[in-house]
Image: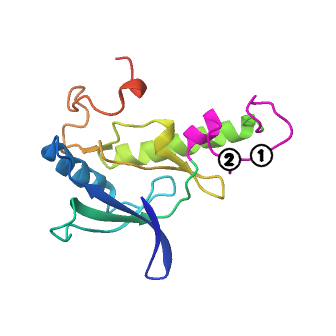
Amino acid sequence: VYKATYHGATVAVKQVKKSSKNRLASRQSFWAELNVAQLQHDNVVRVVAASTCAPASENSLGTIIMEYVGNITLHHVIYCTRDAWRQEEDDEGGCGRKALSMEETVCYSCDIMTGLAFLHSQDIVHLDLKPANVFITEQGVCKIGDFGCSQKLEKGLSQSPHVCQQGGTYTHRAPE
């Protein structure tokens, strides 16, 4: 993912590569990312534009241009892996950074739940929700991103318990 400028706005540009191992999965991932293309919500990373045009020499299925939300994820915050995240002398978290306050924890949780509720109201299931796919903006707002495993449910099937294939990141799957 690259930081760029598109029509005067700072954006994130994601070039979706063809997988030599599984071309079908690569195509499905590209189109799954576009499930949210028409949606706008404060807690969902917005897709600005997309293109399937790529030079033949490129190993690319297409390009997705998204709003730029920064490069800090909830994973960085929880596991203290990003130097830019809140350097503090008060080492409550044991990693040279200040631990999340209860207020921040509640706000982040509410942002994520609000984003998920919106996606579900649009019949979209993320299928790979994990800390690394939740971005935290400079304003402290959580935005759900990376929809490569997502599915748009068919109308009338959204209440069925078996409409989704198992997907996502193995270490972050729900136990059921």
- Residue appearing at x 22%, y 64% in the figure: 58
Mark 2 residue element? loop
> Which residue corresponds to mark 2?
83
| Residue occupying image coordinates x 86% and y 36% | 90
Amino acid marked by disc 1: Gln
Within 10 Å of the Cα at label 2, are there few (<14), some (14-19), or many (20+) other Cα atoms?
few
Q: What is the x, y in percent for residue 77? A: 63, 40
Q: Name the quadrant containing residue 59.
A: bottom left
Marks 1 and 2, how far apart at CA: 7 Å
Quarter of the N terminus within the rendering: bottom left
- Point out residue 168 in the picture as x, y percentages from the top left corner: 33, 34
Q: What residue span does the magenta drawing correspond to?
A: 73-97
Kindly identify the amino acid type of the residue bearing the numbered disc 2: Asp
Instruction: Tell whether 121 sits left or right of 73.
Output: left
Q: Which residue is mark 1?
A: 87
- For residue 60, the mark is none
Give x and y (percent) for residue 114.
Answer: 50, 45
Under circle 1, the secondary element is loop
Q: Residue at x 32, y 50 (%)?
A: 122
Which residue occupies 18% across, 51% down? Answer: 27
Residue closest to the far front: 57
Q: Position of residue 142 (x, y in %)?
A: 56, 49
Question: Of 139 and 119, which appears nearest the observer?
Answer: 139
Task: Using a 10 Å C-alpha cutoff, classify the residue at mark 1 as few (fewer than 14 neighbours), some (14 to 19) or many (20 or more).
Answer: some
CB atoms at circles 1 and 2 under 8 Å apart? yes
The residue most toward the top is 176
Which of the pair 59/68 is nearer the observer?
59
Magenta: main secondary structure equals loop
